[in-house]
Amino acid sequence: MRHFDREIEHLKELLLRMGALVEDQINESIRSLLERDSETAQRVIDNDTAVDQMELEIDQHTIELIAMMQPAAVDLRFVAAAMKITPELERVADLAVDVCERAIELNREPPLKPLLDIPRLARMAQDMVRQSLDSFVRRDAVLAREVIARDDEVDLLTETSFRELLTYMLEDSRNISRAIRLTFVGKYFERMADGATNICEMVVYLAEGKVIKHQHEHESD
C-alpha cells in the first residue's frame, strides 16, 4: 500500500508539472499578444511538444496504475480524474499556441485598436485555469464550484468583445482581417475557461463522488 501511495503522489506531481507548464504557456501567449512579441509567440509554439510529451507520460502512468494496482474507491476516482484532466490541460496548451499564431499574424499589421476586453478575458481564463489546478491539488470542491460559476462571466465578456469588433468590421472593410483574428483570440481564451470548468467538474467528482457535468448548463437555461 505504501508503494501504491507513492505512485499516486508521483501521478499528482506529474499533473502539477504539466499544469505549471501549461500556465506558463498561457502567460507567455498573453504577453506575446499584448507586447506584440512574435519571438515569445514562436517560443510558445515550439514548446507545445513538451506539453504533448507530458500528456503521454501521464497517460502511460495512469494505465500502469490501473493495470498493476487495481485501485478502488477514492483512489480509483483520483486516477479517473487524472485521465480526464490531462487532455483538458493539453487542449488549453494548444489554445495558447493558437493565440500565438494569431498574434504573429496580427504583428504584421498596425494595431486595430487598444486591447481592453481581450486582456481582461485572458486574465480571467488564466485565473480559472490556475484555480482549477489549485482545487485539484486540495481536492477542494468549494473552490471548484466557484470556478465553474465564473464561466458565465467569461462567456458574457467574450460576447461583448465580439460585438465591439464587429463594429470595426462594419465601419471599414480594411479592419476585417484584424478584427476576425482578434475575435478568434477571444474565443480561444473562452475555450481555455471552458477547459478550467471541465477540470473543476472532475474535482467535484473526485472530492464528492458526484458527476455534475452539464449540470450548471441546465441550471443557467
Image (cartoon, rainbow, N blue to C red):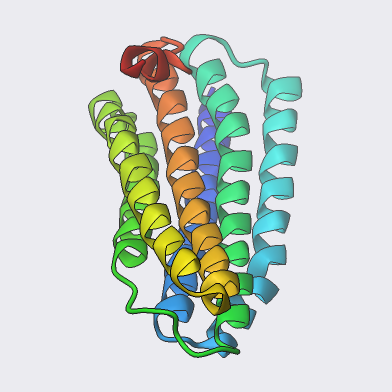
Q: Would you place residue 60 above or below residue 19 in this image?
A: above
Q: Would you place residue 184 above or below residue 44 in this image?
A: above
**x, y percentage for residue 119?**
33, 66
Q: Would you place residue 10 above or below residue 219 in this image?
A: below
Q: Does residue 21 appear in the picture of this structure?
A: no
**x, y percentage for residue 91?**
61, 48
Of 54 and 64, nearer the camera is 54
Residue at screen point 55% across, 43% down: 10
The single residue placed furthest to the front in the displayed view is: 171
Of 57 and 194, nearer the camera is 194
The N terminus sits in image quarter: top right
Q: Does residue 121 appear in the picture of this structure?
A: yes
Residue at screen point 53% across, 27% down: 81
Q: Would you place residue 72 above or below residue 79 in this image?
A: above
Residue at screen point 74% across, 31% down: 64
- Say which quarter of the image contains residue 131: top left
The C terminus sits in image quarter: top left
**x, y percentage for residue 183?**
50, 59
- Say which quarter of the image contains residue 43: bottom right
Give the tally of numbered discs: 0
Q: Is 186 left, or right, of 173 in this rendering?
A: left
Of 97 and 47, nearer the camera is 97
**x, y percentage for residue 178?**
54, 74
